[in-house]
Image (cartoon, rainbow, N blue to C red):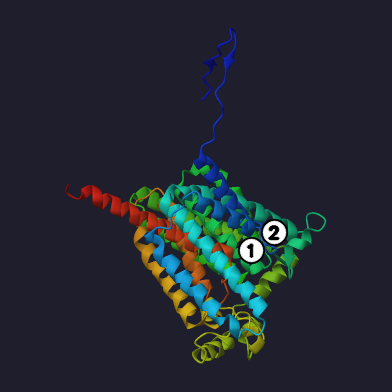
Amino acid sequence: MSQETADPRPGSTVRPPVTIRVASIGDGALWLAAFLSGFVIREPAPYELYLAGLTVVWLAFGLKLRREIGPLIICLMLYISGGIASIPLASEMGDAVIYIAVSGFLAVTAIFYAAILAERPERYSVIEKGYLAGSVLVALIGIAGYFNLFPGADFFTRYGRARGTFEDPNVFGPFLALPTVLFMHRLLNKPMREVLAYGPALAILVLAIFLSFSRGAWGVIAIATLVVYLLSLITERKAARRLRLVALGAAGILAVIALLGVVLTIDSVSEMFVERAKLVQEYDGARLGRFARYALGFQMVMENPLGIGALEFNKHFPEDEHNVYLKGFTTYGWIGGLAYIVLAGWTMKRLVPLLFKHRPWTPFLHCVFAVFTAHLILSVIIDTDHWRHMYMLYGISWGLIGADMIEQKRLSRMRAPA
């Protein structure tokens, strides 16, 4: 309000005090949480410390845990309970306690995102904007690190691969999948005049994912892009726009080929690409490699209902599980392993019908669904147990599921006879 009010003293005016809406403060705090989600190079990360405080404050101001997100809460509680029960089986109980405590905190973050979106689904745009801004910055840091653009920039690489502000390139790449797909969706469905606005950011994200040399990230992008593209084609009703989508799909393939052609002219990039592009690496197919450990690990699980304890698998085998479903049973016991599988399946079952409903947040949901689906597939060969953005995907999914259920109940009450 810029209106001035009269002052009792002649010739003077008084401006009313500037007020800030509580909702705006809350949205700003939520934006910052999404922005910080990409800065986890050390534990505890700024994201964790900030979100812990934010969750407490939000709960203190009345954030509700609605019954519509009950499946998420119950499955995560069972998951963590299984982990707690397995702690005494670990040879290093202190490390096991810390590991399960981190799991518990990440479960709380998923519930937090679900609760705030179920209450007000329009907050998805705040999370989206914060995530997009943070991811572009993280991607730029990763690119700068790979090409050593400033002194000490190689700190943001590992094993000759871009890792940005993450400990591992294999987490850095998949983290960038959701913002990449969000930009791709906009390019597919927004007017052509807006393409130039999204193009540079999309190019930065795609290059960063490529330089992570994470086969998992490449797979996630390929699967998620295909899912979003097909959803756009299926849900588009106008023939002209469908034709545009086909043309953009062809143009996108040519653009990726051109980008690969440019970056592969750099010898170091070309050599790493050839090495990482092999479908089966030596550590995958070796005698006790990744695939052999899966079979032996599940056999071990059958003999240990409570699991074997957190961080114990690599004491029996050369490396960790590298399979989140196997890890669910080894670290969280039969209860936790089954709870995680049920949660993943339940989430997919509830998300699919929402893809074909017309809501303001449906385009965002398409991208979340595509990336979430790709991550569930990726989880077969990579341990996503402590990936912060994976828990965020669960939380966002159930928040929008809950919001739709609340809306359906509201409409049912309105239609019910008095």
136 on left or right of 366: right
Q: Which residue is drawn at 47% across and 48% down?
A: 123
Contact, CB < 8 Å: mark 2 with mark 1?
yes
- Which sits in the foreground, 164 or 217? 164
Q: What residue type is labelled 2?
A: Gly
Pointer 2 residue: 142
Residue 187, position as x, y percentages in the image? 50, 50
Q: Give the x, y percent position of residue 249.
A: 48, 57
Helix, strand or loop for disc 2: helix
Residue beneath disc 1: 172
Q: Name above or below for residue 384 compared with residue 25.
A: below
Name above or below for residue 13 compared with residue 229: above
Q: Residue at x 66, y 52 (%)?
A: 137
Left or right: 84, with 42 as reference point: left
* Residue at x-position 58% and y-position 53%: 33
Q: Position of residue 70 (x, y in %)?
A: 40, 64
The amino acid on which the numbered mark 1 sits, given as a three-letter code, is Phe
Query: How far across and down, in percent of the image, does residue 338 sit?
Result: 45, 79
Mark 2 / mark 1, whichever is N-terminal: 2
